């Protein structure tokens, strides 16, 4: 992160980097499931004969990766001297807030771990979680590796999703 911040106010970063990052926010906003906060695994119009519902799916590990990228982009824009970029912070915060809400919903305290993900039926507005118990190690590792409070908070407490500070 420190390397990125050294380049925040350079011409290259402001022109090239933002030309790539900012349009991506629109794609994420379009793919976000407003009711859940999660972002679809792939665009809704994608079809795979082996998995016809692929365009309706979301995964926990993809949410945490996206959240990490959004948090880095937020920090870079926050520290930039380019005031024209500051207006994008609200969009980033909204997307990140949705993902954090999803992560709280994805944590299953009765099982002590995060759900792998699931699918969302846009017609009925129904969330279908991957049937439990289905422990997916990558979901746990992605979430826990992304946050510093693991040692302080206790991973498997019954209030983990509420106690865990997703904002750090």
Image (spheres, rainbow, N blue to C red):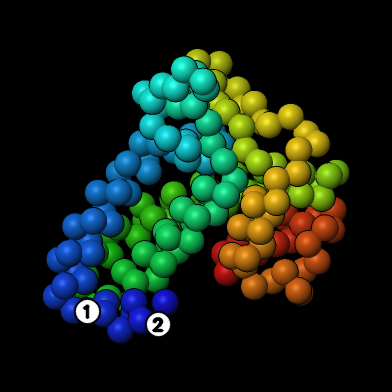
- Is disc 2 placed on a helix, strand or loop? helix
Question: Where is the C terminus found, in terms of image quarters?
Answer: bottom right
Please tell me how crowded label 1 is: few (under 14), some (14-19), or many (20+) other residues with Cα within 10 Å. some
In the image, taking residue 64 as reference, residue 18 lies left or right, namely left
Please identify the quarter of the rendering in which residue 4 is found: bottom left
User: Which one is nearer the viewer's eye here, 40 or 53?
Assistant: 53
| Circle 1 residue | 9
| Circle 2 residue | 2
Q: Evaluate whether residue 30 shows in this view.
A: yes
- Is disc 1 placed on a helix, strand or loop? loop
User: Which one is nearer the viewer's eye here, 18 or 57?
Assistant: 57
Going 39% across and 55% down the picture, which residue do you hit? 92
User: Which one is nearer the viewer's eye here, 46 or 85?
Assistant: 46
Q: Position of residue 50 (x, y in %)?
A: 51, 20
> Is residue 32 shown above or below 86?
above
Q: Evaluate whether residue 84 shows in this view.
A: no
In the image, taking residue 56 as reference, residue 131 lies left or right, namely right
Q: Position of residue 68 (x, y in %)?
A: 48, 61
> Is residue 58 shown above or below 101?
above
Return the mark for residue 102. none
Q: What is the spatial separation of the Cα atoms under label 2 and label 1, in whole angstroms?
A: 13 Å
Please identify the quarter of the rendering in which residue 72 is found: bottom left
């Amino acid at each position: 992160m420190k390397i990125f911040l050294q380049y925040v106010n350079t011409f290259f970063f402001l022109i090239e980097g933002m030309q790539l990052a900012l349009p991506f926010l629109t794609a994420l906003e379009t793919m976000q499931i407003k009711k859940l906060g999660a972002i679809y695994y792939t665009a809704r119009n994608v079809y795979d004969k082996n998995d016809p519902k692929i365009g309706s799916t979301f995964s926990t590990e993809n949410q945490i990766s996206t959240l990490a990228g959004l948090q880095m982009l937020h920090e870079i824009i926050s520290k930039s001297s380019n005031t024209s970029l500051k207006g994008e912070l609200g969009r980033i915060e909204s997307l990140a807030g949705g993902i954090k809400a999803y992560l709280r919903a994805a944590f299953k305290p009765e099982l002590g771990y995060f759900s792998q993900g699931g699918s969302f039926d846009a017609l009925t507005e129904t969330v279908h979680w991957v049937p439990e118990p289905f422990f997916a190690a990558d979901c746990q590792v992605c979430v826990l590796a992304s946050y510093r409070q693991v040692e302080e908070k206790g991973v498997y407490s019954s209030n983990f999703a509420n106690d865990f500070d997703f904002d750090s």
